Amino acid sequence: MTEKDLFREIGNINEKYITEAEETKRAVIWTPAFRRTLTTAACLVVCFGLYLGVRHLDLGMQNESAPAQLENAMDMSQNMTMDSASDSGNGAGEDGSFWEEIWPMENATTNTESKAEWAESEMIQQDTYEESTNVEGAIPEADVEVGANSGAVENVENKGDSVATQGVQETQKDSEQREKYFMVDLLPYPWLFNGWEDLESFLELCGNGEAATLELIRTLEDGTYERAYLSYDGKASYVWTQWQAPDYGMSVEKATETEYGKLSVFEDMREDGTTCYVVALGEADVSLQDLRDGKEGTLIVLQYVE
Amino acid sequence: MEDSQIIELYWQRSENAIAETSAKYGKLLRKIAMNIVGNYSDAEECENDTYVATWNAIPPTRPNILSAFLGRIARNIALNRYEYNKAQKRNNEFDLVLSELEECIASKSTVEESVEEGMIAAMLDDFLEGLKKETRVIFVRRYWYSDSVKDIAKRMQISESKVKTVLFRTRNQLQDYLAERGVFV
């Protein structure tokens, strides 16, 4: 049988599938940008509602765990909004300020350490992780390995117990009520996109040697939107394209375009037990030490927040 | 005009049958043919040949879904025209469709010759039934309608990379599905 024969056989499928394919057409309004807008708006409404609830709730009439639940839910929600809780846009890798800037809120409710102490402990944990991480486990040059039934990141060495964790707080895992975001941090403001499938598709296409593009967007402190593409040309080149937009998703001018030859993916576990992935772009292999040193423009962190 | 009325015109051997068919489905038939043959003049000829074939087929046939019936005829006519023109012209997009389907065929030399007619189509129906709706629509748009990846992405309001990934995975699933049932060894 040839491919033409198979093509003819496909022509004989049940008419209901043919009709279904003819009738299925999504309205133009449901563009990715529009979906992101709705999702963000819904998330903001939920956050505002939780905030009002906490303010007016009589905590004395609740059980002991409820305040922690609500506070953690607020903190998690605040972490997931596009308005970053970080104070400024500098300081990656300066005495733990990178970690402090990006993830202060979650840890504030899970331990009694001060921010400085927490940052220091985080640095120690990263040192421990550095020693145990096999850099060779990173994806080779211009190539992302894709497993048979999984995305590239699952082939990266999982450092397991080498980084101390405080365990997952059950109160933080109110996941059914929350949107799932993957936060891609290009220092210091997080990049957002919805759906693990977009990232997995991108990595799979890269692994297959096909051209692919990943779309990202984020909000800066002044409310300006920035948009970025991470593109792979199907051969040996990754391009990070970034530009500013005065209104949501409507690009104006291309601001920067940077080409890289290598993409590496690391898997890491944060203190609260959530998984994050680090995508490193550069001309040479980069390690997590480079991440701590804050090589701007070359490192993107993907954080799975649940 | 409703499909049942158009079919009745064929049964009555009314010349308006073809005019009504052209008015309602001409664009669809040209699109299907164009996706395969790649040029407008051949697509028009295929459309006209489709009307002739339909006139000869109805009666005795009384199709349940006229659009699918016409589309199937146009598709086969266009494929024949594509094969006829293959030496002189190339349609890069349709060549890509065929090359993608080639991945589903494990070994051309070991296909069971005794496969009953229509069995593979029945297997394909079962395969499609097991897919999610979005995946099934993407598959049918690509390999029945021969739409380009860009057109499918626009229709479904998803990214082209997602369309490619869905098609890639579905082809692999189809290959495994057919191999399990002994169609391709």
Image (cartoon, coloured by chain):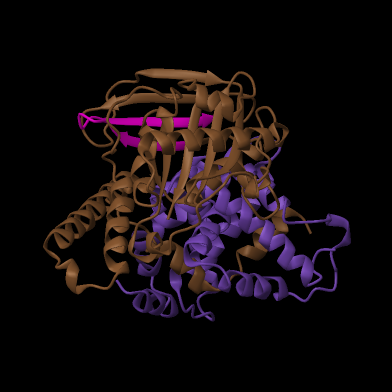
Chain colours: A brown, B purple
Total labels: the figure holds 0
Left or right of A238 on screen, residue A7: right
Q: Main secondary structure of the magenta part?
A: strand
Residue in view at x 88 percent, y 61 percent: B110
Residue A167 seen in the current view: yes
Q: Position of residue A181 (x, y in %)?
A: 39, 49
Q: Position of residue A140 (x, y in %)?
A: 70, 31
Residue A139, magenta (yes or no) = no
Foreground of the two, A206 or A64: A64
* Quadrant of the rendering where the N terminus of chain B is positioned: bottom left
Q: What is the quadrant of residue A235 in the picture?
A: top right
Q: What is the quadrant of residue A211 in the picture?
A: top right
Foreground of the two, A121 or B96: A121
Q: Position of residue A135 (x, y in %)?
A: 69, 32
Q: What is the quadrant of residue A260 in the picture?
A: top right
Residue in view at x 60 percent, y 36 percent: A265
Left or right of A222 on screen, residue B24: right
Left or right of B12 on screen, residue B124: right
Q: Position of residue A76 (x, y in %)?
A: 33, 52
* Quadrant of the rendering where the C terminus of chain B is positioned: bottom right
Instruction: Note whether B97 is above or below A282 in the view shown.
Output: below
Q: Which residues are magenta?
A: A214-232
